[in-house]
Image: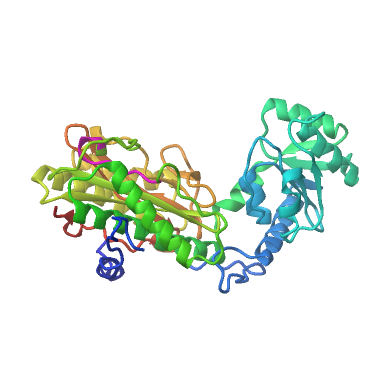
Amino acid sequence: MKNAHPRREFLRRAGTAAVVSAAGAFGRARVVRAGWTVSVLGAHDRLQPEWYQTKIQQVQHEMAKHKLDAMVLLNSTNVIYTTGYFHLSTERPLAVLIPKSGEPVLFIPGLETDQVKLGWIKDFESYFDYPGPENRVRWIFERVAKRGLSRGRIGIEDPPLGRLRQIKAGAPSARIVVAGELIERMRYVKDDDEIAIMRRAMEFADFTVQAGREFVASRGSVTEDEILKASADAVADKMSRELRDVVGVSIDPPFGGLVPFGKRSAFPHAVPSQGRLQKGDALILSFGARVGGYNVECERSFSIGKPSDRARRLYEAMLAAHDMGAGEMKDGAVAEDVDRRALDQIRRAGFESFLRHRTGHGIGLEGHEPPWIAEGDKTVLRLGMTFSCEPGVYDPDFGGFRHSDTVVVAKERGEIMNRYPTRLEEMVIEV
């Protein structure tokens, strides 16, 4: 895969996008499904009520195939996916009832009652607080039963055993069917509007990597937490200026991201240390962004100064695997086959002992979600699925290299959302 012109152009433009302030922080496959696809974004950077109303109809269409009278969703991500009701998920149960026809109903803790009125779903019931005088899951299903579903066939997500007992106690005469896979599989494939939101998020993910790079280039021997804070400050300022809808934006504490260097870059999930960056180190800048609830990733590996011959060999093996994996994420491919072909590039380079993980994972409303580009996942890829592509090479005596792109499954080859460069000659930071 040749380095695409848009990636070079990104680096040229982004190089002037982040400047150090006096305080030291940075300045600031198209998928068409007949009958369903309608763009509702307009000037927004989150999905609009019309999108969720259509999504409810799609769920009801799938429910009919399974002869379900209703679905009750308690998983907060599934509630958001089907209704757009963003909320802070806590120990307090919150659920949506989707009947086989008509409008959905929300069952919420009392502290949500004023916020829920701002949304498009007008039918809701609330309980005061948790834990309360009776089990709140049981409370929800008692009210579901009273809505004409006492003997209905009700689909639920795969529940813990204790929760299942409460569900059955609340609706003892209903037929409870574990049908969570219905929603999970719908979430696999993103439509045009979801992908548009993810592209918007990618602007911030790519930007954060560049902010980290600029900070390192200007400061030299910095610590990991200094890189994290400068990058987080930069993207937080950018998001604050540019986003029109701020639902679902997050920068994970303490500052977000992973930025290991030196031998610690051989730890795929290294926690920050107080070590200082040195010439000759490998550096990984790993950042995600979330806009409108949807996640994307941009991870890039750098060489601090001219790379050694060994570092070059490690990097090129990683890059070959990355390029193979992204290219193979195409319609009809099998997930585990994509993983094998990608990682075989590292094995053939003689670095099999430096493999630590799979090629990638599904990404969307959750940073990690199925399917998996991994051994054992036999999912057939379909147009509009989205994945990370992040094979890595980790030498404990030197360090590691890993890029991660967010890739949309397309007809002939995967489409990379990121615009940040990947070739070694563009990933050298002189300090």
Name the side, left or right, on which 370 lies relative to 266. right
The one nearer the camera, 198 or 43, is 43
Name the side, left or right, on which 373 lies relative to 176. left
The rendered magenta stretch, by its main secondary structure, is classed as loop
Q: Residue at x 64, y 38 (%)?
A: 90
The one nearer the camera, 237 or 91, is 237
**Residue 355's x, y, as percent?**
28, 36
Q: Residue at x 29, y 61 (%)?
A: 21
- Residue 363 against residue 156 in the figure, above or below: below
**Residue 143's x, y, as percent?**
85, 41
- Residue 88 against residue 328 in the figure, above or below: above
Q: How is the image coloured?
A: rainbow
- The residue lying furthest to the bottom in this view is 42
**Residue 409's x, y, as percent?**
45, 58
Name the side, left or right, on which 174 lies relative to 321. right
Name the side, left or right, on which 419 lies relative to 130. left
Quarter-of-image position of residue 177: top right
The one nearer the camera, 248 or 327, is 248
**Quarter of the rendering occupied by the N terminus:** bottom left
Tell me which segment is drawn in magenta. Answer: 256-264
Q: Was residue 262 drawn as part of the magenta stretch in this picture?
A: yes
Residue 181 in sight from this viewpoint: yes
The number of callouts visible is 0
Quarter-of-image position of residue 37: bottom right
**Residue 277's x, y, as percent?**
19, 43
Q: Was residue 169 drawn as part of the magenta stretch in this picture?
A: no
Q: Which residue is drawn at 21% across and 37% down?
A: 351
- The residue lying furthest to the front in this view is 22
Residue 68 in sight from this viewpoint: no
